[in-house]
Image: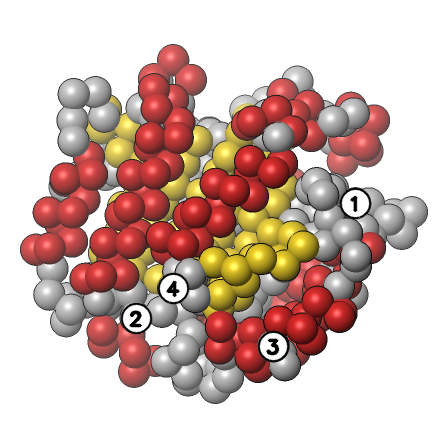
Amino acid sequence: MAFDVEALSHNVRQIGDLAHLTIEDDRGNPSLRFGFVLKLYVKDAYETSVCERLIKLVAAYGALFGDMITHYMPYEGSRLKSVKDFDYIAYFRNRMLSLSPDDPEGFDAELYGFPDAVDRDEPTACHIGVTAGPAIDLKRLGNTANALGRLEAYFPADWLTNDYPLYHAILSQWADIGRPIHGSFGLGLIMEEGCSRGPSMPLAYPFLKRFVGLEYPDLDTWVTMSEDSTSPTIRSTNWLTFIDTPRVEALGGEKAIRSEVEPSCTVRPYDGGLVIQAGPEPQLGDANPGDIPAPYRTVARALRPLRFEDFGRNGIFNGLPSPLMERDETLRWLRRFD
């Protein structure tokens, strides 16, 4: 079902309805879809132990979606290959072990899931990608407590059919495995992987600007833009927000965070940090009538001192239509819950 920005609020009665909605480009091709977006950031990503944790998360994603996973990205060539009868986890691990910490390319791994197992040039609700920067990239960081690697994954909007406690349980387990320094999980745009975000931005940004609960899958853009920061930072907040212990302490500790957020928010530990849940279920919100969900607002306020905003001329939204300015719109979006 294709639709526009105005139609979104009228066609979505429950979160799972988003799974059936598509934004088409001017040629009628699927350009954007909706689902859940998970973003986790890790430090010291060049270390074998950190890469192993990322690979374990890729394996967990593959196990979670099973037969829905249809393709992986090989290290030779540029075309996806079928996962049928192939041990892609061993393949990723062997690749990682073959790299030295000084390898300038770093490590990456990707899985895709396409309906009918047909590789199409369009967004798919099953995808996970991890990247781990090499040791040489440490020289670019203003603070080594910041990100050198990331995980970005999509989940279908009708995944688990509104069993939100199970969402929290699964993703808390993943945080125990991955030990992110920060990250988020919430409703978001699903975009075509393996290509620039720019061509889709004129279609995508109106949704991001209006429906504040939507996450934007920016790949490595934020990591690159924030690498000069001299203090520990985070990118943004959403329904679930992950922050490690040093960032918790920078905010005054767990008690200080609890005192700032709504009573409907929960704060629970994972191995190395806290996961903050902004209310019992994820929400889209709607900036037009001023519907900024209160739990989201209070979590953003509590974590605001950590938020990176020191962008130069650019931001994370490449390809915005004129006269919109990339840096200005990036800051407006990061402050959308304020």
- Mark 4 is on which residue type? Val
- x%, y% of residue 184? 55, 54
Q: Nearer the viewer, mark 2 or mark 3?
A: 3
User: What is the quadrant of residue 190 in the picture?
Assistant: top right
- Labelled disc at residue 44: 2
- Mark 3 is on which residue type? Gly
Can residue 320 be seen from the camera position used here? no
Q: Residue furthest left?
A: 98
- Labelled disc at residue 253: 3
The answer to which of marks 3 and 4 sits earlier in the sequence is: 4
Report whether 283 appears left or right of 131. Answer: right
Report whether 40 appears left or right of 5. Answer: left
- Mark 2 is on which residue type? Asp
Residue at 74% from the left image edge and 27% from the top image edge: 14
- x%, y% of residue 129? 36, 45
- Mark 1 is on which residue type? Gly
Find disc 4 in the rendering and name its residue. Answer: 42
The secondary structure type at the circle numbered 4 is strand
Q: Are marks 3 and 1 in contact (CB under 8 Å)?
A: no
